[in-house]
Image (tube, rainbow, N blue to C red):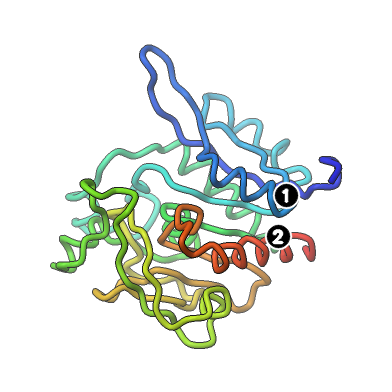
Amino acid sequence: MNSKTRPRVLVVTRRTARKNKYIDYVGEFHLALLMRVGLLPLMVPVAEGASACLPDYMSGMKGLLLVEGEDIHPERYEALPENWTYLEATHPLKDEIEIRLIRHALRLKLPILGICRGSQLLNVVCGGTLYGDVQKEKSSSLPHIDFAHYDTYRHRISIVARSPLEQWYRRKTLQVNSYHHQGVRNLARRFQPMAYSGDGLVEAFWDPKSDFVVGLQFHPERMPEEASGNRRIWKAFDAAIRRS
């Protein structure tokens, strides 16, 4: 496929320090999956000056992928004291850039896929709130992150019947990965849940009035054991982008 025919999907980078300089990056799994279904990933850096460039990035934008990153700053939503008590590292510029892109995509009715932090920010922008720390606030015995078994840890979620998630994975329960401590407290009114963890946390949601606005707390791109279900998510995202 000629790259000129590929719809552009924006994805904002994450920043890390390497010796005396910063590195902006997006996980390769995200990029590879976008390209595999025929989309063109366009990375938006969190470098100084990026905000002024957003109108150019938005030009020709056909979809938005929101991925992992630092905690969402409590100033961005109706926070409780717990949101400040359990707050870890934040990145205000990443918040600003992604919020502007979400609002732009919603205004133009463009498809949005939010994964992990991306799902949390999507919920916040639409009026929802977050837990500062899911496990501590819910007094849950279910770990939502396991540093000792970071990539192999799985926990079960229950999938809502007749939801898009059930159509994609074709089952009632699913073993998913988990790499987070914030999570959805109050789901924005426009969204409906698609899955819950055993402690009641919303693990997936969607907007039934939009063609494709989806939030997933887990990482399908890092669950190779569920390749067919994961593939259906990305194909549905691609199909919605081509309809928009």
Q: Is residue 239 left or right of residue 105?
A: right
What residue is shown with label 2?
238
Quadrant occupied by the C terminus: bottom right
Residue with the most extreme front position: 225
Q: Is residue 207 above or below residue 52?
A: below
Q: Nearer the viewer, residue 155 or 57?
A: 155
Q: How many marks?
A: 2
Callout 2: SS: helix
Q: Residue at x 57, y 79 (%)?
A: 167
Q: Is residue 124 left or right of residue 151?
A: right
CB-based contact (under 8 Å), mark 1 and mark 2? yes
Q: Amino acid at mark 1?
A: Leu
Q: Nearer the viewer, residue 172 or 196?
A: 172
- Coordinates of residue 60 in the picture (x, y in percent): 78, 45
Q: Amino acid at mark 2?
A: Asp
Q: Is residue 143 above or below residue 194?
A: above
Q: Nearer the viewer, residue 47 or 78?
A: 47
- Coordinates of residue 234 in the picture (x, y in percent): 62, 60
